[in-house]
């Protein structure tokens, strides 16, 4: 009986020990932290990148996803898609504005606020740039509705994580901004971290979504953009998109100067295709696109007529105006939209390049294409040669060291006399005696 009681006690002790040790071992296991980097304008490709990384984090059973953010803003639809993806993610998400000098402006503010942990590096800033519609008062009602909707959206995100609701709303309505230090003091963000390690160190033990993060031991899994996402992200830069459109114009003018499906025509098609694909993900003023199209027509007219200087100068007016207004839409759809513009220096450079190509290089190509052929029998038109045989009326003449069959149109010509080519029939030269030229 004693032996039986002893064995039962030992067995119970083993069970109890296993129950105590197992959770401790689980708590001390190495956690996975997945990192993604979102830079530049928020667009559909940014949203797809986030969705892909969140799916990877879920499959990896990650403890935390860290989005390193640096953006001037972006499309309202893409921003809301990213916000919804973070809200629906089973893995907690920390949004970290970094490195130093980075910003979370406009759409970036909403993305920062939806993060389960909102963090910033020193020397960074956040805020929203409230847009002003170029259309003036005519769209005041719609602009007010969009502003109220965005303000309510921002409030709901700030309330979700007990952050400074009043300032977040003011940032949307009054275009306020603040530094990372001010944001921490005002309870707009949760953590001020020098780097990623510092962020994870401060996040360790923090309660997120009702559970306490255990980041005492972790491994980083950095997920970069794939080549498709990176290419799409690069062309969505306003300066890159504008350069593609300008290069498309240059290639098209080159094609018009020497028609035929050449490399210039193919280049124009590719540049316009990629350029308009980029415009589809940017806030575009389509009236400005119309101005650029008008300038292209004027440049083409100048190239094909004798009024190239005057018409090219006129074409520069809609080209420069369209370039300046290209990313300034007449209707402000949302405070999430960034303030984008093409570099003035790039506009001046492309305008000068188009003028130079139109008036110098392409004009020279066009003139050269209209000249008579410079090879074969037709290249001998007007030249003087010497008869190798008597022309009566047919025979041979020697021109530029070559012997050609010839027919005299001015009567018989003796051997050794000079003749001039006045026309060509196939490979036979039509000549007249030089001393009979009037």
Image (spheres, helix red, strand yellow):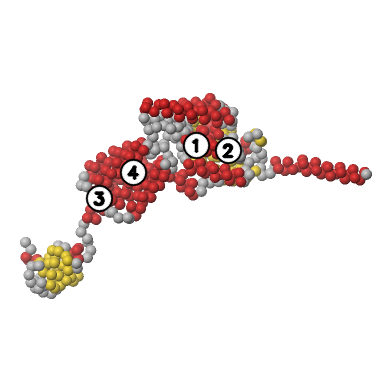
Which residue is rendered at x = 66% and y = 44% of the image? Answer: 30
Look at mark 2 in the image and give the residue it sits on.
Answer: 88
Q: CA distance from mark 1 to mark 2?
A: 14 Å
Above or below for 368 versus 141? below
Look at mark 4 in the image and give the residue it sits on.
Answer: 350
How many other residues sit within 10 Å of disc 1, few (<14), some (14-19) or many (≥20)? many
Q: Position of residue 279 (x, y in %)?
A: 40, 42
- Local secondary structure at mark 2: helix
Query: Which is closer to the viewer, label 2 or label 3?
Result: 2
Comes first in the chain, label 1 or label 2: 1
Q: Horizontal placement of 140 versus 178: left or right?
A: left
Above or below for 80 versus 227? above
Q: In the drawing, what numbered circle is on residue 147?
A: none
Q: Position of residue 358 (x, y in %)?
A: 27, 47
Q: CA distance from mark 2 to mark 3?
A: 60 Å
Q: Quadrant of residue 239?
A: top left
- Local secondary structure at mark 3: helix
Look at mark 1 in the image and give the residue it sits on.
Answer: 79
User: In what quadrant of the picture does the C terminus appear?
Assistant: bottom left
Q: Is residue 386 visible?
A: no
Which residue is rendered at x = 13% and y = 67% of the image? Answer: 430
Query: Which is closer to the viewer, label 1 or label 3?
Result: 1
Query: Which is closer to the viewer, label 2 or label 4?
Result: 2
Q: CA distance from mark 4 to mark 3?
A: 18 Å
- Local secondary structure at mark 1: helix
């Amino acid at each position: 009986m004693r032996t039986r009681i002893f064995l039962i006690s030992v067995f119970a002790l083993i069970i109890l020990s296993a129950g105590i040790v197992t959770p401790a071992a689980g708590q001390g296991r190495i956690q996975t932290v997945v990192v993604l980097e979102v830079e530049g304008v928020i667009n559909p490709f940014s949203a797809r990148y986030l969705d892909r990384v969140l799916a990877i984090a879920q499959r990896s059973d990650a403890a935390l996803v860290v989005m390193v953010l640096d953006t001037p803003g972006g499309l309202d639809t893409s921003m809301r898609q990213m916000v919804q993806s973070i809200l629906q993610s089973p893995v907690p998400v920390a949004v970290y504005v970094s490195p130093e000098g980075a910003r979370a402006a406009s759409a970036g503010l909403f993305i920062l606020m939806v993060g389960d942990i909102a963090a910033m590096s020193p020397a960074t800033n956040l805020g929203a740039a409230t847009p002003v519609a170029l259309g003036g008062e005519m769209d005041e009602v719609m602009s007010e509705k969009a502003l109220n909707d965005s303000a309510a959206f921002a409030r709901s995100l700030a309330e979700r994580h007990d952050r400074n609701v009043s300032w977040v709303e003011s940032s949307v309505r009054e275009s306020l901004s603040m530094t990372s230090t001010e944001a921490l003091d005002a309870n707009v963000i949760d953590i001020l971290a020098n780097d990623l390690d510092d962020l994870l160190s401060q996040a360790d033990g923090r309660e997120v979504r009702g559970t306490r993060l255990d980041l005492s031991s972790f491994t980083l899994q950095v997920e970069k953009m794939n080549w498709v996402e990176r290419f799409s992200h690069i062309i969505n830069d306003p300066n890159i998109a504008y350069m593609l459109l300008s290069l498309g114009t240059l290639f098209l003018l080159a094609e018009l100067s020497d028609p035929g499906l050449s490399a210039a025509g193919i280049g124009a098609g590719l540049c316009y295709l990629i350029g308009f694909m980029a415009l589809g993900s940017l806030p575009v003023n389509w009236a400005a696109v119309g101005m650029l199209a008008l300038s292209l027509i004027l440049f083409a007219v100048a190239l094909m007529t004798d009024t190239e200087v005057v018409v090219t100068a006129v074409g520069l007016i809609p080209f420069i105006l369209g370039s300046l207004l290209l990313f300034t839409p007449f209707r402000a759809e949302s405070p999430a939209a960034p303030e984008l513009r093409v570099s003035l220096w790039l506009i001046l450079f492309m305008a000068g390049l188009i003028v130079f190509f139109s008036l110098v290089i392409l004009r020279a190509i066009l003139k050269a294409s209209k000249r008579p052929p410079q090879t074969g029998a037709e290249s001998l038109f007007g030249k003087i040669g010497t008869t190798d045989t008597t022309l009566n009326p047919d025979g041979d003449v020697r021109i530029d060291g070559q012997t050609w069959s010839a027919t005299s149109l001015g009567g018989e010509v003796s051997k050794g006399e000079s003749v001039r080519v006045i026309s060509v029939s196939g490979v036979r030269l039509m000549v007249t005696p030089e001393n009979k030229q009037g």
